[in-house]
Structure formats: C-alpha cells, structure tokens
Image (cartoon, rainbow, N blue to C red):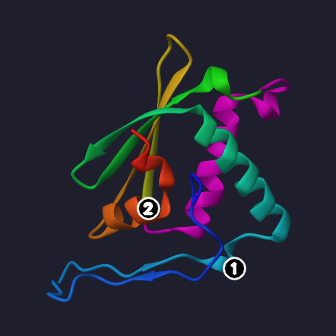
Amino acid sequence: MTFTHAVLPWLFFAAATASSSAVLLVCRLDALTASEQERHRLLSDTLQRAAVATTELPGGYDITLDLTRVPGGAARSRPVVQLADWVDLESRCCPFLDFEIRMSGQGGRAVLRLTGGDNVKAFLQTEFSLLSRR
C-alpha cells in the first residue's frame, strides 16, 4: 500500500472482546470524485517521498515530513498546501481519523499526526505502508 489506503471497501471491527468504546472503521469510497481520487493518489505518493520518520503514539502515529522534498511553485502547489489538501481529501474518505499538522519554522519540516479511537492504530499499521518504513 502507499501512504494512504487503497480504493477498496474496508471494514475493521473492534476486537472480539467488544467494549462499549469499540469503533467501526469504515472508509467512505463515495466521498471523492474520480478526479479527487487521482489528486489524492498523487498527493499520497508525493508525501510518502517526503516522509523521513515515524513516531508511534498510544493512539496513532506522528509522521515527520521534509517539505523540501515536495515539489512546489505557485501558492496553490506549496508543500504545506499540498499537505493540507491531502488531509482534506483523506478526512473525507476516513472520517474516523483525527489529523493534526505541526510546522517547524526551521528546516522545512512538518509533522502529520494521525490518531483516532479504538483500533485506529491497527488500521494505520495495515493501510499505511509508510509506518513500517522506519
């Protein structure tokens, strides 16, 4: 898989020992138009190349991105705008994820935090191949 999930139906149920906080994770395949899906794929590939580190968190991951590795130019294609565009698209597909972007004023680094409720971490480990590249 790439930085993001494939365009396939994916259901991830809570553990068999279901708790009251168990969450059903469902990707919304109808959330993006065909052109948005293509933009999402291109942004995913670009951001995967920019990833330099991952940090495991209790409920997800921090992914450190070197934004100098993201081609830019006009204001619309600036690296941070591309990251924000990816978050917008991904959040529509996977509404169960929580996103946070932290920027460093030095060195062109950003940290993308992906977290959520029960089982989100397992989902991220399965669907985001970047997390296995340490």
Q: Position of residue 51 (x, y in %)?
A: 53, 35
Picture coordinates of residue 82, whole percent (x, y) = 69, 39
- Magenta region includes residue 82: yes
Label 2 packing within 10 angstroms: few (<14), some (14-19), many (20+): many
Depth check: 122 or 74 in front?
A: 122
Count of residue discs: 2
The outermost residue toward the front is 133
Residue type beneath disc 1: Asp
Residue displayed at 59% across by 77% down: 28
Q: Which residue is mark 2?
A: 97
The question of residue 46 being in magenta is answered with no
- As drawn, 78 above or below 33: above
The part of the chain drawn in magenta is 72-96
Q: What amino acid is at disc 2? A: Leu
Label 1 secondary element: helix
- Dot 2 lies on which element? strand
Q: Label 1 belongs to which residue?
A: 30
Secondary structure mostly taken by the magenta-highlighted segment of the chain = helix
Residue 48 in the image, given as x and y percentages of width and height: 59, 42
Residue found at x 57% / y 64%: 5
Point out residue 25 in the picture as x, y percentages from the top left corner.
42, 77
Apparent side of residue 85 relative to residue 99 in the rendered image (left or right):
right
54 in relation to 132, above or below: above
Q: Which mark is residue 12?
A: none
